[in-house]
Image: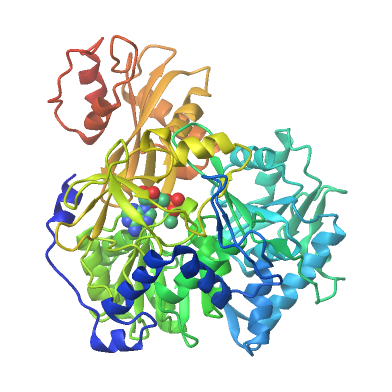
């Protein structure tokens, strides 16, 4: 809570300079308020006008919002469009064909430029190739590929033919890939031979092979492989085919498949409070509208900008602010294959200087780790690079602590660039609560105010509004176009998770706690209220990690996972484990902890590895057998137990768990 306390007591305010304000699309608080008032006065008029203004419709919609089957809201439902047409053809029509769409920098620093015309050609060729492979509208295609032009081409090609993509982050394990292939019923996977990160080559196709060999992937017919390194890999005849062979013979023209606005553009798996990751399903029209609009509002993106979002396309941030937002807005963007610390921790700053990046969007975890690196090695400090091209900075994925905010502002932004601290989620499709660079006075650590049209509020546990100054549950009172449509294959879970009856069934439950400032009404996010952790900006379910641990059934009897605040990663994963053998200590405990960590990496992926594993003879439970997680959270933080433990079945266990093995 100390982090939140310091945010709540934050008194520093940074107003946009007159220059920034003048140049911005939404200029000054009065313009922001006017837009909010428009949305208040005529909600469907507001969204309908935006949708007509921002997107190219093949068939115009006649109804903006259909609430007849709430909470399964439908937007622009009788309209038809194509996402790839709006991201690519729209730029050719606008005379942007020769403009650079993507500046790709590989791990080794080599650079490739791709114009909108070239991107269009690549996408059309692959789209035709996918069709030649028998892939059609409505099919699901899994994409498991490193950061690359090919990754963006793959997503856009799916969109072009109306296939629904599901991108899986390259850091997930074979088991995770297999589960997603099965859940989505994917007919094809688009992957690469290997990936290159930090000077090292890592397998990726081999993980796909392993995933398929685990069984259950009956619908899967084709594996398309992008040749990244050219090192020898296994290619299974009749199933595996090179990407260049799929594209090669195809025409560079491909008539887009016109789909209904509600057609599922993609499914993206994310962690929830139960064991199984959920497939968040997004629409085509509403999603794309917000991807484009927020590029223009939140980042104030202009034709001459060079935008750089450092997120991987395996996360929602990479969907909205790499694949779809910048292209739909006709903005040149940098796509980076590598890691921020290779060849040294000044890589981001050197790249900003080299490419003259103007809009930079990254995660607090990256900022914190680069602060630390520059403290030990002055050569990687941002002041060693010329960052004067920067205009606006962004932060995403987790709360940014005021100290990191101030460092970002001073050393990266030269005290001149507004920082947009964007709060949103996989489920929201795009930004929800964020400052506008040319309007909102900034307070470090606060994501400030909702975007126009986003009816965010704070309520108590039964759904009643709370006054400013009182912390509660973050909700959104009205549906918005880019919202999650359902959980793939599990509409009941969608309803229960996001429109719970306890809140009256009409409020979207974000899953975060939040508080609004008494005077300004500014929002501060206080962290998840469910069993979801945020480790380095990556969402992890505690139950998911617990299930992985107990799946090692020869060793583990019981496991409970909690989060602990961490200076670098925001939160760290702590696992309390009861073994099916006497409690280990010393070297044995260390060896077993390593074995379990490696196991979790295999079950879910390295990002889910617990930082700390404690062994106990038991877990603290109430007499009715419920694990007392609040006690485990206190132990994980190293706090003395001051809570009442009289209802505990086995109080002595607390001391044992507090010991470091
Ligand atoms: C957290 C990432 C504070 C929050 C786009 C949310 C944030 C979860 C912020 C979603 C922010 C995201 N300030 N917390 N600016 N942005 N979060 O689905 O807990 O990976 O619910 O989407 O990250 O994570 P997800």
**Location of residue 107 in the rendering, given as x and y in whole percent from the top left corner:** 53, 68
Residue 122 x %, y %:
73, 73
Q: Against 536, is 328 above or below?
A: below
Residue 587 occupies which quadrant of the picture? top left
Is 329 left, or right, of 38 in this rendering?
A: right
Residue name at image x 71 percent, y 77 percent? 120
Of residues 532 and 94, the one drawn nearer to the viewer in this rendering:
94
Name the spot of residue 74 as percent of width and height, x first: 58, 54
Residue 571 placement (x, y as % from top left): 32, 45
- Return the residue nearer the eye: 99 or 172: 99
Residue found 72% across the figure and 39% down from its top: 212
Residue 199 can be seen in this image = no
Front-most of 219 and 83? Answer: 83
Answer above or below: position of 303 versus 122.
below
Task: Pick the quarter of the image with the C terminus.
Answer: top left
The residue lying toward the viewer, choosing from 587 and 340, is 340
For the N terminus, the image quarter is top left
Residue 569 visible here = yes
Image point (49%, 64%), residue name? 44
Residue 643, quarter of picture: top left
The image shows residue 352, relative to residue 541, as above or below, that is below
């Amino acid at each position: 809570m100390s982090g939140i306390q310091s945010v709540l007591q934050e008194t520093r305010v940074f107003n946009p300079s007159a220059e920034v304000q003048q140049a911005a699309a939404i200029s000054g608080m009065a313009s922001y308020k006017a837009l909010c008032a428009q949305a208040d006065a005529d909600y469907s008029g507001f969204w309908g006008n935006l949708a007509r203004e921002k997107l190219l419709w093949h068939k115009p919609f006649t109804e903006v919002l259909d609430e007849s089957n709430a909470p399964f809201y439908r937007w622009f439902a009788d309209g038809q469009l194509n996402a790839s047409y709006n991201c690519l053809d729209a730029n050719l029509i606008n005379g942007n064909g020769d403009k650079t769409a993507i500046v790709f920098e590989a791990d080794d620093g080599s650079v490739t430029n791709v114009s909108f015309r070239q991107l269009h050609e690549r996408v059309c060729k692959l789209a035709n190739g996918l069709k030649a492979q028998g892939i059609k509208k409505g099919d699901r295609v899994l994409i498991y590929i490193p950061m690359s032009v090919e990754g963006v081409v793959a997503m856009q090609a799916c969109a072009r033919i109306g296939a629904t993509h599901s991108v899986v982050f390259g850091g997930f394990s074979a088991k995770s890939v297999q589960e997603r292939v099965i859940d989505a019923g994917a007919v094809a996977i688009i992957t690469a031979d290997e990936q290159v990160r930090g000077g090292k080559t890592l397998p990726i196709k081999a993980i796909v092979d392993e995933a398929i060999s685990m069984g259950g992937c009956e619908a899967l017919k084709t594996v398309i492989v992008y040749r990244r390194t050219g090192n020898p890999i296994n290619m299974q005849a009749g199933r595996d085919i090179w990407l260049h062979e799929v594209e090669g013979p195809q025409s560079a023209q491909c008539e887009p498949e016109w789909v209904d606005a509600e057609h599922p553009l993609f499914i993206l798996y994310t962690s929830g409070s139960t064991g199984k990751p959920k497939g968040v399903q997004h629409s085509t029209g509403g999603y794309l509208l917000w991807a484009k609009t927020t590029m223009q509002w939140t980042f104030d993106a202009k034709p001459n900008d060079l935008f750089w979002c450092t997120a991987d396309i395996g996360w929602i941030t990479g969907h909205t602010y790499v694949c779809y937002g910048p292209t739909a807005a006709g903005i040149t963007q940098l796509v980076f294959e590598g890691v921020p610390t290779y060849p040294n921790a000044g890589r981001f700053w050197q790249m900003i200087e080299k490419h003259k990046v103007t809009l930079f969007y990254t995660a607090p975890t990256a900022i914190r780790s680069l602060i630390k690196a520059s403290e030990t090695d002055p050569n990687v400090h941002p002041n060693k690079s010329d960052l004067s091209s920067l205009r606006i900075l962004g932060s995403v994925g987790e709360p940014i602590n005021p100290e990191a905010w101030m460092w970002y502002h001073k050393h990266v932004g030269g005290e001149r660039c507004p920082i947009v601290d964007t709060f949103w989620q996989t489920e929201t499709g795009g930004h929800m609560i964020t400052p506008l660079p040319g309007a909102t006075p900034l307070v470090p650590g606060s994501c400030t105010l909702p975007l126009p049209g986003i009816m965010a509020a704070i309520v108590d546990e039964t759904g009643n509004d709370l006054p400013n100054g009182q912390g509660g549950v973050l909700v959104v009172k009205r549906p918005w176009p880019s919202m999650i449509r359902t959980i793939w294959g599990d509409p009941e879970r969608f309803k229960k998770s996001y429109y719970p009856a306890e809140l009256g069934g009409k409020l979207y439950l974000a899953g975060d706690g939040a508080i609004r400032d008494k005077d300004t009404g500014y929002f501060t996010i206080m962290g998840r209220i469910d069993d979801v952790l945020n480790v380095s900006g990556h969402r992890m379910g505690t139950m998911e990690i617990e299930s992985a641990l107990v799946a090692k059934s020869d060793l583990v009897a019981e496991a409970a996972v909690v989060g602990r605040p961490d200076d670098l990663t925001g939160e760290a994963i702590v696992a309390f484990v009861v073994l099916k053998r006497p409690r280990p200590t010393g070297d044995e405990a260390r060896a077993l902890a390593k074995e379990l960590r490696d196991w979790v990496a295999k079950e879910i992926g390295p990002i889910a590895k617990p930082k700390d594993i404690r062994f106990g003879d038991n877990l603290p439970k109430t007499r009715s057998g419920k694990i007392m997680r609040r006690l485990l959270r206190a132990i994980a933080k190293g706090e003395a137990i001051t809570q009442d433990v009289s209802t505990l079945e086995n109080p002595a266990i607390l001391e044992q768990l507090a010991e470091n093995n």
